[in-house]
Amino acid sequence: MKSISWFARVFCLVCVLLAACTQPSTPAAPVVSTQGAPAQAAPANTKAPEPTKAAPASTVASGPTQGGTLVVGLVADPVTLDPHSVTENNTRRSVYAMFDPLVRESADKIEVEPALAERWEASSDGLVYTFYLRKGVKFHDGEPFNAEAVKFNIERQIDPNNPYFKDGNYLFMRLFLSPLQSAEVVDEYTVRLKLKAPYAPFLDHLGTCASYMISPKSVKELGKGVAEKPVGTGPFRFVSWEKGQRLVLERNPDYWGEKAKLDKLIFVPIKEAQGRLTALQTGEVDFTIDLAPDAIGIVRSSPNLMVAEKPSRQFWSLTLSNKFEPFTKTKVRQAISYAINREALTKDVLKGTGVPAKGPFSDVFGDFVAKDVRVYNYDPEKAKQLLAEAGYPNGFEVTFLTSVSGSGQQQPVPMAEYIQSNLAAVGIKVKLETVEWATFIAKWNVGDYQMSSRGVTGNSYDPDNYLNTFFNSINFPPQGLNNAFWKNEEYDSVAMASRLAIDPKDRLQKVYAAQKILLEEVPWTYIDHEIDLYYMNKKVNGFQIRGNFLVDWNKVWLGAAK
Amino acid sequence: MSSFILRRLLALFPVLLGVSVVIFIVIHLTPGDPAILMAGPEATGEVLDQIRKDYGLDRPLPVQYVAWLSHVVRGDLGESIFLRRPVVDEILDKLQNTAILAGASLLMSTTLGILFGIISATKQYSLLDRAVTLISLFGVSMPVFWLGMVLIIVFAGTLRLLPAQGMISPAGGGTVDVLRHLVLPAIALALPSMTIVTRLTRSAMLEVIRQDYMRTAFAKGLATRTVYYRHALKNALIPVITVVGAQVGYLLGGAVLVEFVFSWPGLGTLVVTSIGTRDYPVVQGATLVIGAIFVLVNLVVDVIYAYIDPRIHYA
């Protein structure tokens, strides 16, 4: 008797305490004053119809307010804070706040705009670029930004004899600025960059993180340590980084451009998608990305949350190996393109997080998208007919290699299953081989598959990213990523010519001609373009996304808390 | 006793050697290339070869293993391929966090487990006993990550009582903040373990209570509470302590899932991420450390076991 009574007493006490602590579950209740939302112009931020315009909610009567802390939920901890060593988007999202490149991709046009360089000239042979730098810019440590600093930053990455060459992993420089040969100082604010060969994407690629300028003094003092104590010129400067927990940045009051409205910017890694959603709902983070397709509905129906969309440059395709007999026939590849119901896939499986693709280039590529190309509507009858003409009246069997996840891959397994059923309807029996991301990449990169799928995002608005990288036969593995081993000589010459063409009109014609072949021969089956989705609390305003997942954090301001 | 301890400590070395060989073989046989994973999908041929050369990944496997081993015996666990930091630093940073989580869970599971076990045993077949049994069944059947997610949705999402993820608040810090973040993951991790301790304590207690010397104690006129807690419990705890030692192994492993669900920056997350990026030095270093902890904890448990039970002595 005595034992039970003391236990019962303790138990009751605990229950009472818990009950006292419970707060009313506010968000779910319909009582919430959504009436408070009117001037916020919430619709401007959700479902932004304009493809490239980011939703400026500054149509609000009350303008940007200073101050506040924005907490951003990332999918993982940044790997390094040394911009020259950054290779993936997740890290870049946070690093971007602290640095500026020489030039930047424009937010709403397919062109390059001044950043740390005010203007530039290119020589007629395309081998020498002269940049006139902005004056009076200072690094976060007070050091001046000038031509010497640019030379230092570039030589660190390209000269094996440079004392700081070993400190990092300068992949973007190697991959996207490979023709860059040297940098020379003309005068304090003029620097000349020389290339080994003409390179049409040069200016565009100069907007990538290989061109983020680090303070030379910090590199000389810290060496490798700049990966943990970054010093740049950007609108935010580094405060602290507790690995795996949070990265804290604060406003740079001396910024040369549009100064930040926020006082503090904090990045928090949350690995699990459900965790990110819950953290957004509880207000632990104000802004996050990469949630499951079902989450869109949940976020949209939450009174204090909203979704911003931006069409992306990504395209998701089936890659068809030419080492597998049926795929060497054009008619078979065309049949597969006709057999897929892209509308239903994007609507039912992706729940609107993608739009059907007509080719590798989504509408954000503007004028680069060719209009006069073959169109593949959903036509299973035509698919069966083409298969019969190619000699496969009863279809064939094929193994489909897919990954479970991966950045930019959308929902690989559900999509693969849907495609499997589409192809079964025209007689092609698909067997799914599902592997984990690292294993998948190891196989996909070398073309070890019969049929596979891949979501690809170019690093810039330059079509060369897709045209040559994946479809030119000089890029068979291991040199390149044409791992479908597709070879078409006419295509090769047109695609290469488009890379070397300097005159914009001439180049455009060649880009169109290349696309025409890509849509006629369909070496890859273009399925959809992912829509970039950003989930945030309604108090986040001024939100602007540039291409390639970069957010201009200095434009963000916080409205009334919801 | 001391020679026993010495022998067990010496046994650490062959055990860890075996662990490292097995892990090395398994992780290298798994398809996947750290160079590609590090460079990103667009990197090709020449760039990848350079990375492989930089990290010595192009050498034959036995050579790589021996090179790694020769550094380990000097105390150098190498450098992480992905993070370019010494492995030791990475591990120590994260080990601290996992220790906090595992320690809290261990405390919770042992104290509450023993408490419930005693109650269950002394009130056998009562309503309380059946309730505890039911909860035990639930706790041991539910996958720990599901449990974690449910706790997040209920206590963080709907009730807004506790934080949803992480070890500290983005804008906060301090002991109280960490404790608040610790509650849910510790419960998720402790629950399966607690049920095992409960059941074991219950059955051990039941067995002890049936012994003759218990009857003697009651006949002497001792109070019930004295009989149970002073005499029965001590004897019942012997098997329980052994199990607790094994629980530490479970906690270190289960911590991986809980850490992932709660974004707790610990060793488990480090190992999982490193496996995903094929960061060989980190995986090898971390498994070595975890293996060492496991062996040492079991040694401590065995020593305590001998100390408590005078019938046991080690030759």
Image: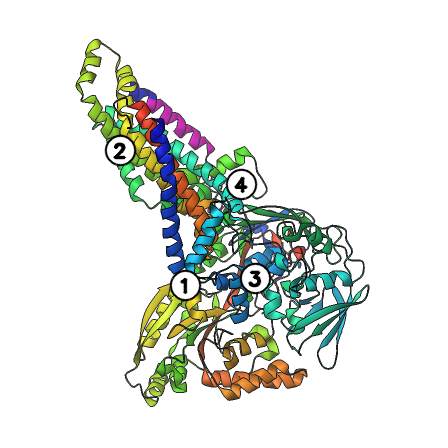
Disc 3: which residue: A87
Task: Give the camera-side residue of A287 and A323.
Answer: A323
Task: Indicate left or right for B126 with B70 as reference.
Answer: left
Chain letter behind tag 1: A
Query: Label 4's element?
Result: loop
**Crowding at label 3, few (<14), some or many (≥20) Cα neighbours within 10 Å?**
many
| Range of magenta residues | A7-33
Chain letter behind tag 2: B
Mark drawn on residue B199: 2
Task: State whether residue A453 is above or below residue A223.
Answer: below
Q: Are marks 1 and 4 on the same chain?
A: no
Disc 1: which residue: A439
The answer to whether the residue labelled 1 contacts the one labelled 3, judged by CB atoms less than 8 Å apart, is no
Task: State whether residue B12 is above or below residue A331.
Answer: above
- The residue that appears at 67% across and 50% down in the rendered structure is A222
Instruction: Look at label 3 and name its amino acid.
Output: Thr
